[in-house]
Amino acid sequence: MPPPASSTTVSASPPDFLGEDTLDLAQAEATVAAYKELLADLGRRGLAGKAEVSVKLSAVGRALPDNGEKIALENAREICRAARNAGTTVTLDMEDHTTTESTLGILRELRKDFPETGAVLQAMLHRTEADCRALAHEGSRVRLCKGAYHEPETVAFRDRLDVDKSYVRCLKVLLGGQGYPMIASHDPRMIQIASSLASRYGRRAGTYEFQMLYGIRPEEQKRPAAAGETVRVYIPYGRGVVRLPHAPDGRAPAEPHVLPPLPDLEEVGSHDHSHHRRRRDGRDVALRARPGGWTRRPAHGGGEASRARP
Ligand SMILES: Cc1cc2nc3c(=O)[nH]c(=O)nc-3n(C[C@H](O)[C@H](O)[C@H](O)COP(=O)(O)OP(=O)(O)OC[C@H]3O[C@@H](n4cnc5c(N)ncnc54)[C@H](O)[C@@H]3O)c2cc1C
């Protein structure tokens, strides 16, 4: 699968089960159905070349008591098939460290039939530089992020500086390798270092991409896009709670977090987020898709809903 042609694209999580562990089979199946609906919609709207989907294996059944991994693999396979039929790809989100081995195992299985399936690696984990080496081969799409989970020091770097140093080591492996690195960070230093390394390793724009969360530092998102880089915007949506990242030591991020209302998919595809009204909310935000537009509401009550369109 070639890298996306446009400079700004959308990556989406499933509707309805955002950030939640799936606790029964019906819920896992409903999540798969939601993905298939989303992918068919992306295909119908001609957006599949610009948008891919991200899947959390816990949302498609991994935590189910009987055969959870097998169920998650089959469900993820179904989503991969729907993505390919629509003309796009899937990336498996990475969850906490107790699931890393399982996620990479399921990735290996999926890649037998769908080699375009993307992986996520978390620089905060000690193991990740080695995982980068194993996955830096041709055709391998790897998203590198710092890691959003509060992990024990037996498996993870807890100091921000150590996480950043690991991120740079991993960037060197991925950008110096043969795969397609997806650099997921809002940290201007990491973005700048990634750009310099890409030049050092002779990478052309379009042989890697930057990824950022929708609504976080939009100016930082536009800057590399304006310089001709590929920037993908990740949009969590559905009913559930968006857990915005904490610092590696478990502290909540220092800055207040503002998520603008979600746009319609066509608006995302048109690369113009600037007209959306911005509002302040708590760190945990629930987003809901419904016919005719998008709504959002505070995760802990409040119940206020707003249309995304101005
Ligand atoms: C596209 C994408 C996909 C991701 N997928 C995963 C995944 O599968 N698994 C996983 O564990 N983690 C995932 N993450 C989260 C990631 O691991 C980090 O927790 C998160 O990106 C913050 O790290 P940072 O690199 O942006 O740098 P940081 O050093 O944490 O942040 C740098 C600066 O960016 C700004 N910033 C960062 N986050 C926010 C925020 N939420 N609100 C406001 N400002 C902010 C702040 O100004 C901060 O100073 C993903 C992130 C992105 C962008």
Image (cartoon, rainbow, N blue to C red):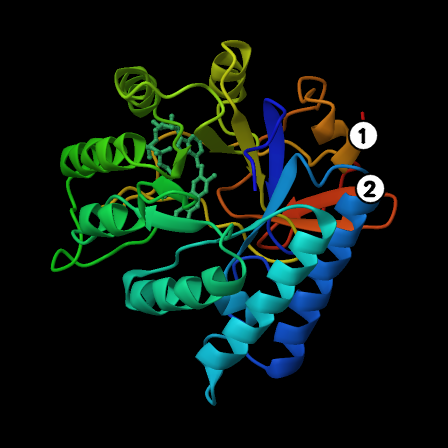
Q: Are marks 2 and 1 in contact (CB under 8 Å)?
A: yes
> Would residue 285 be found to the left or right of residue 166 on screen?
right
Residue 137 makes an appearance in the image: yes
Residue drawn at the location 51% of the way across and 16% of the way down: 219
Label 1 belongs to which residue? 309
The picture quadrant where one finds residue 145 is: top left
Residue drawn at the location 30% of the way across and 25% of the way down: 190
> Would residue 259 be found to the left or right of residue 123 on screen?
right
Q: Return the disc, 2 or 1, that comes first in the chain's sequence.
A: 2
Look at the numbered disc 1 and give the secondary structure of its residue.
Answer: loop
| Ligand 1 occupies quarter | top left
| Amino acid type of the residue tagged 2 in the rendering | Gly
Task: Give the total number of marks visible in the rendering.
Answer: 2
Label 2 belongs to which residue? 293
Q: Nearer the viewer, residue 278 or 126?
A: 126
User: What whole-number distance in Å separates the C-alpha atoms at marks 2 and 1?
Assistant: 8 Å
Q: Position of residue 213 (x, y in %)?
A: 51, 35
Q: Label 1 crowding class (10 Å Cα cut-off): few <14, some 14-19, many 20+?
A: some
Q: Position of residue 30 (x, y in %)?
A: 70, 71
Look at the numbered disc 2 and give the secondary structure of its residue.
Answer: strand
Q: Position of residue 97 (x, y in %)?
A: 28, 61
Give the vertical position of 33 relative to 92 (above or below): below
Q: Position of residue 225 (x, y in %)?
A: 53, 16
| Amino acid type of the residue tagged 1 in the rendering | Arg
As drawn, the residue found furthest toward the top would be: 227
